[in-house]
Image (cartoon, rainbow, N blue to C red):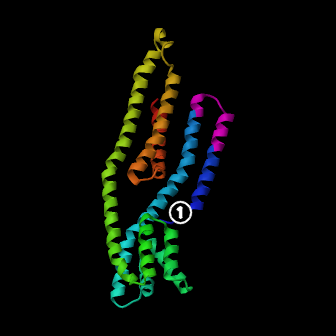
């Protein structure tokens, strides 16, 4: 998985929002009925959210891979230090191995050290580039050990154990919250099923009775109301699922896109 820079996310948001606005303008110009306009709105929402959702997922996978390879890197540095290598030599040796996306960052660190940068500057630059939660916690320990004049290499062994335990705790948390994410999906599809059955068995039949037709919503009004309800629930249910599952609201964009598409297709073909 490649790294996604912040400027790439901003460009994706700008382009997707611009396309969404074009779709909305087209819907206003070619306005034929409110139901068609609502479909254009949902399409605009999907266009606006889909690129950001994909980039956020790719960036999450990249950061996750970085964190998962940190314990292996720290163990390799400790083993190299025990053979008599200095920390600089240990990092150079580790850069020859494969640690997923972390390998490219290691090679960049080696290049910076060859240019004369200090160990502290190299690690701080690495932390700023990667900027994962575990690197932000680990790098300051290395920097402080370097400033105190101690054996920096000896910091990596307990730090590797800390990172490994943190990853295990995070996996356990995700395993515990996964059922709640599934509940979000199940509740949304139960809502869709209920809405479809209510519309087809109640509103359609009641609309055929002239005595009750004026007292109830028309079939077109009911269809539009349920369409709005499903759209709102799909959007916010997805954001809630992302917050529960991965800890960030932006992670819920992919869930929102999936639920929006599922809701649109279900109501389009079964209403």
Residue 20's place in the image compared with 99, above or below, is above
Residue of label 1:
4
For label 1, the SS is loop
What residue appears at the point 52 percent right and 28 percent down from the top-left corner?
224
Q: Quadrant of residue 31?
A: top right
Viewer-proximal residue among 181 and 24: 181
Where's residue 34, x and y in %?
Answer: 59, 29
Crowding at dot 1, Cα within 10 Å, few <14 / some 14-19 / many 20+, comes out as some
Viewer-proximal residue among 196 and 254: 254
Highlighted range, magenta: 21-37
- The number of numbered badges drawn on the structure is 1
What residue appears at the point 60 percent right and 50 percent down from the top-left corner?
16
What residue appears at the point 49 percent right and 46 percent down from the top-left corner?
257
Residue at the outermost top position: 211
Tell me if residue 173 is in the magenta stretch. no
Query: In the image, is 9 to the left or to the right of 188?
Result: right
Where's residue 173, x and y in %?
Answer: 32, 55
């Amino acid at each position: 998985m490649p790294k996604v820079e912040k400027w790439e996310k901003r460009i994706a948001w700008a382009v997707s929002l611009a396309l969404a606005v074009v779709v909305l303008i087209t819907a206003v110009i070619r306005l034929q009925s409110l139901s068609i306009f609502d479909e254009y709105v949902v399409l605009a929402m999907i266009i606006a959210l889909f690129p950001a959702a994909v980039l956020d997922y790719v960036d999450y996978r990249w950061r996750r891979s970085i964190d998962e390879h940190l314990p292996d890197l720290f163990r390799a540095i400790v083993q190299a230090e025990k053979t008599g290598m200095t920390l600089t030599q240990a990092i150079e040796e580790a850069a020859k191995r494969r640690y997923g996306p972390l390998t490219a960052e290691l090679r960049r660190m080696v290049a910076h050290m060859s240019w004369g940068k200090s160990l502290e500057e190299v690690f701080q630059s690495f932390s700023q580039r990667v900027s994962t939660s575990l690197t932000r916690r680990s790098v300051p320990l290395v920097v402080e050990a370097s400033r105190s004049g101690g054996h920096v290499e000896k910091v990596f062994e307990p730090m590797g154990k800390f990172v490994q335990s943190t990853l295990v705790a995070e996996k356990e948390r995700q395993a515990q919250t996964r059922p709640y994410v599934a509940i979000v999906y199940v509740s949304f599809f139960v809502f869709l099923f209920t809405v479809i059955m209510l519309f087809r068995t109640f509103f359609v039949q009641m609309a055929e009775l002239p005595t009750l037709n004026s007292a109830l919503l028309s079939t077109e009004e009911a269809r539009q109301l349920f369409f709005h309800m499903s759209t709102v629930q799909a959007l916010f249910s997805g954001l809630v699922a992302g917050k529960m599952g991965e800890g960030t609201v932006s992670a819920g964009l992919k869930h929102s896109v999936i639920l929006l598409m599922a809701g649109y297709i279900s109501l389009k073909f079964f209403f």
